[in-house]
Amino acid sequence: MPGTKVSEETRREDILRAAYDVAARQGLEALTLRAVAARADVSHGTVLHHFKRKSELVASLLDRVLYATAVIRIPDNVAQITRPSERMHALLRSEMDRLSTDPRHFRLFLDYWTFGVRNAVVRQRIRTVLEEYRAALKGIAEAVVAGEAAPPPRRGAVKSGANGAATSDGVAAVAVSLIHGCALQSVIDPKGFDVRQHFDAAAQMLDRLSSPAT
């Protein structure tokens, strides 16, 4: 409605959405307060009111980037699958499709990873979220390893059990590598990379990892 005043919280959210769009399209280097103001259709002064400098905007945007790229999504149809290996395959495919559909989001995650090399706070935040991502996959991996492959490893074993089968920690770590490897290749070669081929190979690798050695 004409004349309706936008709340400070809503305005800040609009600015963050605009900042995400600018950064996802052009990278963190292109994220300036003026570019964000233009994208949000507000004055430069309005952006300055909420973010005094670019570094504040970059820091505030981090959680949004991590949510888009490093927080796992488990769709209802995947959660309802009862067989652990099928549920793991379906989740792998879902995450690979999600992260490769628009490579700009993962490219922005990589920008933050590079930024984190110089910034301990950003680096630790990314590390924490990736640990949570692995932990979410570990819950499914435990069911795969325990229910369809082999018993849990003996105390003291780290990456594999006595019979050579990978542990849930190992399977979860590999799953994250395969998912993010898919997203990375989508960034590098979005036209030439085939997500289906990557998924098929990834599923076979995980099957071999989670099955007992013969």
Image (tube, grey):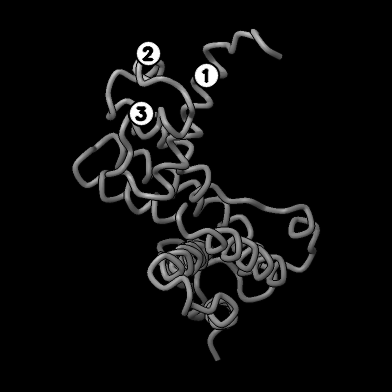
Decide which of 164, 197 is in the foreground and name it: 197
Q: What element carries label 2?
A: helix
What's the residue at 52%, 12% (across, down)? Answer: 8
N-terminal label among 2 and 1: 1
Please state if 162 lies on the left or on the right of 109 as rendered: right
The quadrant of the picture occupied by the N terminus is: top right
Mark 3: which amino acid?
Answer: Leu
Residue farthest to the left? 118
Q: Are marks 1 and 3 in contact (CB under 8 Å)?
A: no
The residue where tag 2 is placed is 49
Q: Mark 3 points at which residue?
A: 57
Q: Which of marks 3 and 2 precedes in the sequence?
A: 2
Q: Of callouts 1 and 3, which one flags the residue occurring earlier in the amino acid sequence?
A: 1
Q: Nearer the viewer, mark 2 or mark 3?
A: 2
Three-letter amino acid code of the residue under disc 2: His
The span from disc 2 to disc 3 (Cα, nearest Å) is 11 Å
Q: What element carries label 1?
A: helix
Q: Looking at the picture, how far across and down is residue 211, in whole percent?
A: 59, 80
Reading the image, the residue beneath label 1 is: 11
Single out the mark in the foreground, 1 or 3.
Answer: 1
The residue at 63%/60% (across/down) is 140
